[in-house]
Amino acid sequence: MDRQRFRRAALATGLWAIVVGAGVAGLMGCGGNSNNNTGGVTPNSIISIVPGAFNKGAMAFSPASDTVHVGHIVRMQNNDGTSHVIMPLTTGGPNWGTISGGRFADYTATAQGKWGYHCTVASHTMSGELVVLP
């Protein structure tokens, strides 16, 4: 009987650890970007990747430059049929990651500054700027 109780307790503890771990992992994703396309969050600003964006430089994003405040959510909406990987030019800048065609990713502005970003896919010449005020 003691052995059976021990097994049940061990199973319950293991399941609890999985549930708590999943919750912590979910919360960790709230501060940076998310590529979930589920809505739910109202962005403070939306930047669109225009159709055929891969070779349009600064014209690949609409608007090409945007201004928000620390704590604001900036949505990158991919209106192109191609996936793009939108990364910062310098550490600390906006990182939307990979965004498939027709989907979006949200980024929460965490640091004041003028931040350049670009698409890192080979042969894509796409660049933009996000200005974050206090």
Image: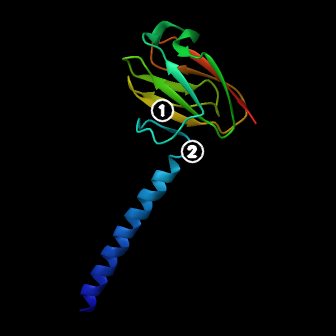
Q: Position of residue 127 (x, y in %)?
A: 57, 15
Disc ID at residue 16: none
Quarter of the image holding residue 134? Answer: top right
Q: Residues within 10 Å of mark 1 (few under 14, many from 20)?
A: many
The residue that appears at 43% across and 12% down in the rendered structure is 51
Residue holding disc 2: 31
Helix or strand or loop: what does disc 2 sit on? loop
Quarter of the image holding residue 21? Answer: bottom left
Helix or strand or loop: what does disc 1 sit on? strand
Who is closer to the viewer here, 133 or 92? 133
The residue that appears at 41% across and 17% down in the rendered structure is 80
Residue holding disc 1: 105
Amino acid bearing label 2: Gly
| Residue that extends furthest to the bottom in the rendered view of this protein | 1
Quarter in which the N terminus is drawn:
bottom left
Mark 2 and mark 1: span between their CA atoms? 12 Å
Amino acid bearing label 1: Ala
**Contact? badges 2 and 1 (CB < 8 Å):** no
Who is closer to the viewer here, 93 or 90? 93
Q: Where is residue 30 in the image (x, y as percent from the top left)?
A: 53, 46
